[in-house]
Image (cartoon, rainbow, N blue to C red):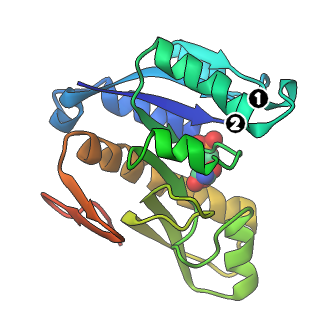
Amino acid sequence: MNRFAILFSGRGSNLEAILQHWSRPEENPDTRLSTPVLALSNRPDAQGLERARAAGLPAKVIDHKSFAHREAFEGAMIEALDEVEAEWIVCAGFMRVLTPSFLKRYEGRVLNTHPSLLPAFPGINAPEQAIAAGVTVSGCTVHFVDDGVDTGPIIAQGVVPVRPGDDGQVLGDRIRAVEHDLYPRAIARVLSGQVHREGRSVEVKGPPLGRS
Ligand code: GRF
């Protein structure tokens, strides 16, 4: 059984979508080989804390501001992750960059979703970046996390239109609706051993995950 923790910093709508997906094993048989064990926030005011607790998942805050160095913050996170024996890390709106040494500890076992069609528009404010660039489609990218910012091997992408008059908020909401469907299914596929990665090349077994 693969035990995973969800790392987040704010609203937690993806966290909630993941927990809902795992609460329906009959419909989502891929989820039977893994289990969420902890919701971990670096912000005490994160709305996702309430969502996790409402879904019955233990939720913990490790405030990065209480630590002098990133390594000390990550050390505290690893301690909390070890306590619940979490060996997989699912980032869902987690707004801290993870250091190479943290990533080494969980090598190949850290996932993220980003609100653009990577490699376009990495980093913050991706929907705003897409609108400023004048693209007509955008979406989300589920990927393995590597040492760069939003540069890891791509597992699945979902596409949405960018409509005239969209602002970052409207486009971000449209992308999130697709993430809520795609990210949980992609996580379950990875954690049930159906995704093979070699370098940057990722093979997803079974029906295609992405929708366009
Ligand atoms: C998502 O759009 C995700 O792509 C990005 O941060 C946002 C988090 O939203 N990394 P939420 O906290 O899950 O609602």
Give the label on residue 9, or none: 2
Residues packed near mark 2 inside 10 Å, few (<14), some (14 to 19) or many (20 plus): many
Residue 90 percent coordinates (x, y): 47, 39
Q: Quadrant of residue 50?
A: top right
Three-letter amino acid code at the position of disc 1:
Arg
**Nearer the N terminus, badge 1 or badge 2?**
2
- Ligand 1 within 8 A of label 1's CB? no
In the picture, which quadrant includes the N terminus?
top left
What is the spatial separation of the Cα atoms under label 1 and label 2, in whole angstroms? 6 Å
Q: On the picture, is 43 further left or further right than 183?
A: right
Q: Give the residue drawn at x 52%, y 34%.
A: 15
Give the label on residue 22, or none: none
Q: Give the residue drawn at x 57%, y 85%.
A: 136
Residue 175 percent coordinates (x, y): 55, 60
**CB contact under 8 Å: marks 1 and 2:** yes
Q: Quadrant of residue 155?
A: bottom left
Residue 193 appears in view: yes
